[in-house]
Image (tube, rainbow, N blue to C red):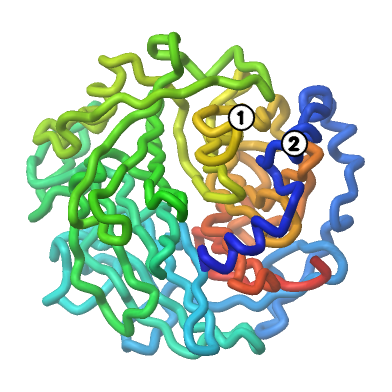
């Protein structure tokens, strides 16, 4: 998917985040303070409750001219005979022999054997006590229905997000550092006691037809991972951390297409601004020149009980401070990063890190929400391969939307979760098919995947 998307990105001369396209974002400051103005932005049009094409169930409200299928529901029996795990989260799409392959995370926090846990080949489980993992769904690109599906990674824990690689795989990230040490947290709950340490990234080939042999990519860091995005020109991996405070990392691999061969982990800092706090008092569209500090110990033993054991190494050297960095995606020479609770109103920020071109090495705040009606708790993000906009999965407190951030800095609603009894459950894992015709997205609970298509 990455190579196809990259060609489309380069053909889009005014893509969000490009040096020219960014000029159109200067209007966003005024718009962000005027929710009525944003509500008047039509986008694709009003959202209409729409039944699923393949089942008739009423799960989403979409603009006129769009339709969807639903599949891969929690508990449905997969081709490998196992029930589909719960807690659908990050995801990416890949082209494969006339089909589309989705590799999908499951943010399962419980132990193996509990309801909703991923059940893979026991001989290829990273930790037989852990219930998280990934599933792979082979999709017919015409019918947009499942051809086959199976567990592709098991024995991991809290697989939240991740990102696609240029070599046709999905990096699945663990959003926890629980491990073998057992301890009681501040709320009196007992944690840990697993057979292996957690808090790592795992490379899952989209071409695999069964459970992969898991390899913990330990030099990429042991922390509360969220997402990754890779610059296809350099092979450098950018990583987000879902904590407050948190850091923004990059991993420089020794071998471009072999992350397991080791590399160097670094943390972003702002030049001449020690521990610069991005969480408040930010000016949109201002340029912050960045530098990087080395993390000497990316896999500290202290991480078993201290989830900031890696971040504290960077903070001690002046690294910048963020609030809950979650989604990340590469596009047009930039890494787009979402701070779910950043900003003066703590409603979310969208950051752009330029990694190529004349603005390389600069961080820029693209958008900051000041009103929950505009944007409330953005999480996963992807870049449209054709239209030059970002798709934001919302994870706020009330109704849940897929929002679109345009080149002009406008936000509008694209989809609303109307699943009866689960209307306030988050969207996750938005990604486009390799040809850009279909947007795939999950609703985490009760757990299902949607294929949306129409008049893009």
Q: Quadrant of the C terminus?
A: bottom right
Circle 2 packing at 10 Å, graded few (<14), some (14-19), many (20+), is many
The answer to whether residue 285 is above or below residue 274 is: below
Label 2 secondary element: loop
Q: Position of residue 233 (x, y in %)?
A: 46, 53
**Residue at left offset 67%, top offset 85%:** 54
Q: Position of residue 263 (x, y in %)?
A: 22, 45
How many numbered marks, from 0 up? 2
Q: Nearer the viewer, residue 454 or 306?
A: 454
Point out which mark residue 347 bears.
1
The answer to whether residue 300 is above or below residue 7 is: above
**Residue at left offset 28%, top offset 53%:** 201
Residue 412 visible in the current orientation: yes
Residue under label 2, please give it.
374
Q: Nearer the viewer, residue 68 or 168?
A: 168
Circle 1 packing at 10 Å, graded few (<14), some (14-19), many (20+), is many
Q: Nearer the viewer, residue 124 or 204?
A: 204
**Residue at left offset 54%, top offset 44%:** 379
**Residue at left offset 54%, top offset 27%:** 362
Label 1 secondary element: loop
Question: What is the spatial separation of the Cα atoms under label 2 and label 1, in whole angstroms?
Answer: 9 Å
Q: Position of residue 200 (x, y in %)?
A: 24, 49
Q: Along the horizontal axis of the image, is 238 left or right of 335?
A: left
């Amino acid at each position: 998917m990455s190579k196809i998307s990259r060609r489309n990105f380069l053909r889009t001369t005014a893509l969000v985040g490009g040096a020219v396209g960014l000029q159109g974002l200067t209007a966003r400051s005024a718009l962000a303070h005027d929710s009525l103005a944003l509500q008047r932005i039509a986008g694709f049009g009003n959202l209409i409750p729409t039944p699923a094409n393949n089942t008739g169930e009423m799960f989403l409200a979409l603009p006129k001219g769009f339709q969807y299928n639903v599949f891969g529901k929690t508990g449905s029996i997969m081709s490998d005979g196992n029930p589909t795990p719960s807690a659908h989260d990050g995801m990416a799409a890949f082209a494969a022999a006339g089909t589309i392959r989705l590799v999908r995370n499951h943010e399962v926090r419980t132990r193996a054997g509990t309801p909703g846990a991923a059940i893979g080949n026991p001989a290829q489980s990273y930790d037989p006590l852990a219930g998280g993992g990934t599933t792979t769904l082979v999709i017919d690109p015409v019918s947009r229905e499942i051809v086959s599906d199976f567990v592709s990674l098991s024995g991991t824990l809290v697989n939240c997000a991740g990102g696609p690689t240029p070599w046709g795989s999905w990096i699945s990230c663990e959003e926890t550092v629980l491990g073998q040490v057992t301890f009681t947290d501040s709320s009196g709950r007992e944690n840990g006691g697993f057979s292996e340490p957690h808090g790592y990234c795992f490379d899952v080939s989209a071409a695999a037809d069964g459970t992969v042999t898991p390899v913990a990519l330990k030099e990429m860091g042991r922390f509360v991972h969220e997402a990754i995005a890779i610059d296809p020109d350099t092979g450098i991996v950018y990583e987000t951390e879902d904590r407050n405070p948190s850091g923004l990392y990059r991993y420089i691999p020794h071998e471009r297409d072999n992350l397991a061969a080791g590399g160097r982990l670094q943390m972003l800092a702002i030049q001449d601004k020690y521990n610069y706090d991005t969480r408040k008092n930010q000016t949109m569209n201002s340029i912050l020149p960045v530098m990087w500090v080395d993390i000497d110990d990316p896999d500290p033993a202290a991480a078993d009980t201290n989830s900031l054991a890696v971040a504290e190494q960077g903070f001690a050297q002046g690294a910048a401070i963020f609030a809950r960095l979650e989604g990340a995606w590469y596009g047009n020479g930039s890494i787009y990063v979402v701070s779910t609770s950043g900003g003066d109103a703590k409603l979310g920020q969208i950051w752009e890190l330029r990694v190529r071109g004349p603005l390389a090495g600069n961080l820029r705040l693209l958008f900051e929400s000041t009103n929950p009606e505009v944007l409330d708790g953005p999480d996963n993000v992807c870049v449209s391969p054709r239209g030059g906009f970002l798709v934001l999965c919302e994870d706020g407190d009330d109704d849940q939307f897929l929002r679109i951030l345009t080149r002009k800095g406008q936000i509008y609603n694209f989809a609303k979760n109307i699943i009866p009894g689960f209307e306030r459950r988050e969207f996750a894992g938005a990604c486009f098919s390799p040809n850009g015709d279909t947007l795939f997205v999950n609703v985490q609970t009760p757990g299902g995947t949607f294929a949306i298509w129409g008049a893009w």
